[in-house]
Structures are given as C-alpha cells and as structure tokens.
C-alpha cells in the first residue's frame, strides 16, 4: 500500500508546489501590470522586475528633484546597468534625461530624452518631459508637436504644462500658432481656454483663440464669472447673452425657474447647503425647504439694473404666517440690502431703489434664522420685477 501510494503523493505535492509558484507569478505579473495604480504592491511583490526598477528610480529622482538634490551614485549605476541589459529600451535614457534635467544639465537631458523618444515614440513620460522642456525654453512650436502626440496617447495630457502654454498665449504673435494647434487638438483648446478664462484680463485673448467648436470643459461660464467678479458687469452680461444666443433677455432672467443652458451668475444659481435647499419643480415654481438653524443663500441671480425705482412681487404657498425665508436685493459690492421681502402665504411685494453708484445687484432668496430654529417648507412662483428699467 505504502509503495504504491508514495510516488502518487509525491507527484501531487510537486503539482501543488508548481501551482502555488505559478499562482504567485501570476499575482506578481498582475501587480506589475497595475503598478501605476498600486506601485507599492508591485514593488513589494517583484522588486527586481525591470519596469518596477524603472518606476523606483523615477520616484527616487522625483523626490530628489523636489529637494533640489542630485541623483546618488547608486541610481547612476542602476541606470547604466539597465542600459547595458536593454540597449533598445527607452527607460534608461528617460531616467538619465530626468536626472540630467534635475541637475540642471539641460542640453544633456534633451539628448537623452530624444534618444528615449527614438526608441519608443509612444512613451508618454518622454513626450511629457520633452514638451515641458521645449515650452519652458521658448521653442513652443516643437513643444506643441510633443503635446499633440501626448494628447493622442492619453485622454488627458495638458495638466503639467497648461500654465506654460497659457503664458505663451499672452506673448505677441502666439494666437495664430495656437489656433492652428487647437484645430488639431480640440481637447487641449478647451483646457487652455478654461485656464485663461480664470483671469478677466485674458478675456480678449480667450475670444481671439476660441474656435467656436463645442468644448468640454466649457470655458464660457468661467469667463463670464471672471468678468463679473472683476466688476465688468456690463461686458459679462453682454458676452453671456451672446454665448447663449439670448435675444434681449429681461432684467430678471427666467422668473419661472425653467430648465435652461444659460449659466450663472445671470441665470439662477442654487447653492448646495446643509441649511436648506431650493429646487425648481418643473411647474413654474421653486420648492424651498429651510431648516432655520443658520442664515443661508438658497437661490441667487446677478442683475444689471439701471438706477431707478423697482417693485418685486412673488406668490408663496402653502404655509401659515411668515416663513423664515426672504427675497433680498443688494448692490453687488455691498452687503447692505436694498430690499428685504419676507415671504408669507399669498402675494408678497415690495419696492426698492437702485442708486446711481450701484452697477449690478444680487437678488437672493435667503433663509434667515430666528431666535429658535423653525422649519419652513414652501413653494415660490409668479416672481415679477417691474420698474423704471424693469419689465
């Protein structure tokens, strides 16, 4: 019995060991393949894998560069060893180029990065470093070519050198070159225009660069908001009207709270707050829930009213007595209200004056806390604004 069973048990044991080894190898390979998402696991399971070694060296170089340090001899030796083992691999040249760049040896870094690109034109790291170097050293045309290649290799590729491209866009003669580049890389156009649109001083530049193609992200709301924040209310509203093809929009836009593509601040904004919520109900009204614990803006719109006398009216239902919710109108550059219209069941109306020095006004639906918290649940509809420059 023992003689017949012994070899069988040995075979089973050997198979089990081989299976375990193969399973571990599969796990290690998967970890290495997923190293960009879980680098620590890959380094722990297979520290000698060439790709893991490369990643480890790049991380070390990045840490040293952040401290303005130089690569130690052991990293330099690892790079030479990797190059000798795989002379056709781009990785040693990419790493050596990164080291040279961190040490301020720009010419050497560029030669090494070009060697890495020759070996693997699809290397995103190489394309990124070359684009960053070209743009930083004023060779924008070459940098834009690298950016175009990078964008074709990945969904997102402008984050690292977006500010450099935006800075170049402000230089004389840059607009035609960038427009030609954006025609080939529309995703980059949207990202750069959004970045430029954060500064109202770039408004003319953004408009001259824009191709008119639908873009994601949409830079138009950002530009309008930047101009309004800079106090350029008339221009901000004019561009907002043009962007959304609105023909002579009323002083109070969308009083029925209908769904619209037009963006704030000249359309309604409904801030997300733990103190309450206001939501259009799709029936011409605004459903409001306010907890009464702290003051909160539940809805707002920026108006550009001319100096004069105005009347604001709204209908409220249901509710009993006054709610803890009010319409407040104020000049955009002042917290002092021109009107405080506390809502109560039925029709509520009030008048206010816009002074000559008040270029724009916020109309806000605010929850106003009392001495004791009180929940207000109501619907606002029939909002109307009339006056010397109203409807």
Image: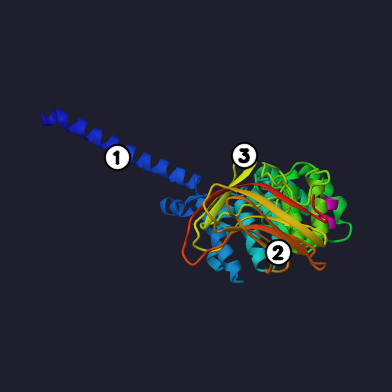
Circle nearer the N terminus (2, 3): 3
Q: Is residue 101 left or right of residue 201?
A: left
Against 330, residue 19 (above or below) is: above
- Are discs 1 and 3 less than 8 Å apart at CB? no
Task: Specify start and end residues of the magenta stretch as a single range.
Answer: 203-209
Image point (46%, 51%), residue name: 42
Cα distance between the residues tagged 1 and 3: 67 Å
Number of marks in the image?
Answer: 3
Rendered location of residue 74, percent (x, y): 53, 65
Q: Quadrant of the N terminus?
A: top left
Q: Which mark is residue 282?
A: 3
Q: How many neighbours does mark 2 have within 10 angstroms: few (below 14), some (14-19), or many (20 or more)?
A: many
Cα distance between the residues tagged 2 and 3: 28 Å
Foreground mark, 1 or 3, reads 3
Element carrying mark 3 = loop
Element carrying mark 1 = helix
204 inside magenta stretch: yes
Circle nearer the N terminus (1, 3): 1
Rendered location of residue 9, percent (x, y): 20, 33
Q: Which of the 4 image quarters holds residue 199?
A: bottom right
130 inside magenta stretch: no
Q: Which mark is residue 17?
A: 1
Q: How many neighbours does mark 1 have within 10 angstroms: few (below 14), some (14-19), or many (20 or more)?
A: few
Rendered location of residue 21, percent (x, y): 35, 42
Overall secondary structure of the magenta section? helix
Residue 5 in view here: yes
């Amino acid at each position: 019995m023992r003689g017949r069973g012994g070899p069988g048990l040995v075979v089973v044991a050997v198979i089990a060991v081989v299976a375990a080894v193969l399973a571990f190898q599969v796990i290690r390979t998967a970890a290495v393949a997923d190293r960009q998402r879980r680098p620590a696991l890959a380094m722990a399971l297979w520290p000698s894998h060439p790709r893991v070694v490369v990643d480890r060296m790049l991380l070390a170089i990045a840490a040293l560069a952040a401290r303005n340090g130089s690569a130690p001899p052991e990293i330099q030796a690892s790079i030479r060893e990797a190059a000798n083992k795989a002379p056709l691999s781009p990785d040693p040249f990419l790493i050596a180029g990164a080291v040279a760049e961190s040490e301020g040896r720009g010419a050497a870094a560029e030669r090494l990065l070009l060697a890495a690109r020759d070996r693997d034109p699809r290397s995103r790291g190489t394309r990124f470093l070359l684009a960053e170097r070209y743009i930083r050293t004023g060779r924008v045309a070459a940098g834009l070519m690298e950016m175009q290649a990078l964008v074709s290799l990945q969904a997102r590729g402008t984050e690292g050198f977006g500010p450099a491209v935006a800075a170049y866009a402000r230089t004389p003669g840059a607009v035609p070159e960038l427009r030609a580049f954006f025609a080939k890389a529309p995703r980059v156009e949207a990202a750069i225009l959004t970045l430029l649109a954060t500064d109202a001083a770039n408004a003319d530049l953004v408009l001259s660069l824009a191709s008119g193609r639908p873009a994601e992200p949409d830079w138009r709301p950002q530009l309008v908001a930047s101009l309004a924040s800079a106090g350029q209310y008339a221009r901000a509203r004019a561009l907002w009207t043009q962007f959304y093809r609105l023909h002579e929009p009323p002083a109070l836009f969308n009083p029925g709270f209908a769904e619209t593509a037009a963006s704030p601040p000249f359309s309604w904004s409904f801030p997300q707050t733990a103190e309450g919520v206001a939501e259009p109900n799709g029936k011409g009204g605004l459903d409001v829930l306010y907890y009464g614990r702290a003051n909160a803006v539940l809805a707002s719109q920026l108006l550009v009213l001319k100096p004069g006398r105005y009347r604001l009216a709204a209908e409220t239902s249901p509710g009993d007595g006054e709610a803890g919710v009010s319409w407040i109108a104020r000049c955009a550059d002042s917290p002092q209200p021109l009107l405080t219209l506390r809502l109560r069941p039925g029709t509520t109306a009030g008048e206010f004056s816009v002074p000559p020095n008040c270029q724009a006004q916020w109309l806000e639906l605010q929850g106003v806390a009392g001495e004791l918290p009180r929940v207000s649940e109501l619907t606002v509809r029939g909002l109307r604004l009339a006056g010397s420059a109203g409807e």
